[in-house]
Amino acid sequence: MPHQPHLIPELRDLPPEDGWPRAEATGRACTICQCGLNTGFVDSSEAIQSFNAHGAEVTAGHAQA
Ligand SMILES: [Zn+2]
């Protein structure tokens, strides 16, 4: 099972400025991986923790799909 974790910041749309779309970070993020890991949108620090811990979890055998 290949692992390729991604950290995805949650964004929300802001009103366009001079016709240009704008967005801002909500402070939440989601960690996903090809193995099926999906934290859903949680606090950014929590998502980053999951992202960083994923390799160790896989190595330890706790996150095998
Ligand atoms: Zn994985």
Image (tube, rainbow, N blue to C red):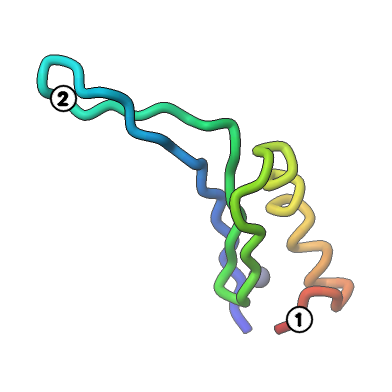
Q: Mark 2 or mark 1: name the one nearer the start of the chain.
A: 2
The answer to whether 39 appears left or right of 11 in the picture is right
What percent of the width, then of the height, locates residue 36?
61, 75
Q: Quadrant of the N terminus?
A: bottom right
Q: Quadrant of residue 44?
A: top right
What percent of the width, then of the height, locates residue 51?
69, 53
What residue is rendered at 76% in x and 46% in y? 49
Q: Quadrant of the C terminus?
A: bottom right
- Count of numbered circles on the image: 2
- Judging by the rendered image, the residue that carries numbered circle 2 is 20
Label 2 neighbour load within 10 Å: few <14, some 14-19, many 20+:
few
What residue is rendered at 66% in x and 46% in y? 42
Is the CB–ligand 1 distance for label 1 below 8 Å? no
Q: Amino acid at mark 1?
A: Gln
What residue is rendered at 42% in x and 27% in y? 24
Q: Amino acid at mark 2?
A: Trp
Tell me the quadrant of ligand 1.
Answer: bottom right
What percent of the width, then of the height, locates residue 7?
56, 50
Relative vertical location of residue 58 with respect to residue 26 in this rendering, above or below: below
- Judging by the rendered image, the residue that carries numbered circle 1 is 64
Relative vertical location of residue 40 with respect to residue 27 in this rendering, above or below: below
The label nearer to you, 2 versus 1, is 2
What percent of the width, then of the height, locates residue 23?
35, 29
What residue is rendered at 12% in x and 15% in y? 18
Q: Quadrant of residue 35?
A: bottom right
The answer to whether 4 appears left or right of 65 in the picture is left
Label 1 neighbour load within 10 Å: few <14, some 14-19, many 20+:
few
SS at mark 2 in the image: strand
Q: Quadrant of residue 22?
A: top left
